Image: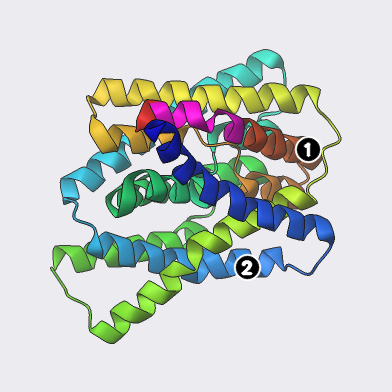
Amino acid sequence: MAVLQTLFSVIAPVFLISLIGYFWGRSGKVFDTPMVTLLVINIGVPCLIVNVLLKADLTADALTEMAAAAFLSLIATAAVAYGFVRVMGWSSRAYLPGLIFGNTGNMGLPLALFAFGEPGLALAIGYFVVFAVLQFTLGLSVASGRFSVKETVRNPVVVSVVIAIGLMAADVTLPKWIDNTLTLLAGMTIPLMLLTLGVSLGRLHVHTLGRSAVLSVMRLALGFGLGWATAELLGMEGMARGVLILQSAMPVAVFNYLFAVRYHSAPEEVAGMVVISTALSFATLPFLLLVVM
């Protein structure tokens, strides 16, 4: 009973806030998803990164280990996913980003916070930073067919990480008024992420099931399997191991759908991947959390 209560306390907030967003999206009420997404990416997430990393009781080695593990896991996922798509004879440009990039922000960060607390959130951010850089470089390149160094360097997530690392290295204590401002702005981020996830799911229309379902199962199985394998390979234990596997096993990120729409890469099937993989993820979360907690 205690285990079930613990699992419920982790899953319920993520599910319920996403559900509020889902019904809001289905109701047709106004929700400016592009504006909220820009607000979260450009202000909320950078403030969350600086705020959490400066307060987390974690060593630089722990964050470096997580970043290295995230990079290894994502590259391994990309290699296996590419081979799978090629064998199936499907479009790499359309389906590869969805297989590689899970929802480590909107869903992964809240789950890490509720499952492991602030230290877990800090480690999850270490994973998310690597993920975000690769998604807006490798992922964007695959979806668009081009690569831009300028967009990478100007990415607010990348900039905030550099700032946070610099402040940590210099052992800087921020003035109280700055700390309070960062805390307030950081506090809006996770609720907005979950509401946006729910609204996006409510507004997406699934017109294809077969291939989207296969790819959804592949995303979850590939993420979990390679996350677990990476943790074993690096000898990771405890919270770090749990966060790595949790983040690696997230469903298809909504950003993959936005890229597919923007670059006309099978958006309807990618929408199906987002919806189906997220539904499967909520159904399998108890098992996943039992493994990682």
Seen from this angle, which residue lies furthest top? 87
Please tell me which residue is depicted at 15% across the width and 63% down the height of the picture: 169
Mark 1 vs mark 2: which is more N-terminal? 2
Magenta stretch bounds:
281-290
- Helix, strand or loop at label 2? It is helix
Amino acid on which disc 1 is placed: Ala
Please tell me which residue is depicted at 71% across the width and 39% down the height of the picture: 275
Would you say 249 lies left or right of 16 here? left
Q: Residues within 10 Å of mark 1 (few under 14, many from 20)?
A: some
Residue 31 screen position, x and y as percent: 73, 67
Q: Quadrant of residue 102?
A: top right
Q: Which residue is mark 2?
A: 36
What whole-number distance in Å separates the C-alpha atoms at marks 1 and 2?
24 Å
Q: Quadrant of residue 182?
A: bottom left
Q: Are marks 1 and 2 in contact (CB under 8 Å)?
A: no
Would you say 14 lies left or right of 117 here? right
Seen from this angle, which residue lies furthest front? 1
Q: Is residue 73 above or below residue 164?
A: above
Label disc, if present, on residue 266 of the rendered structure: 1
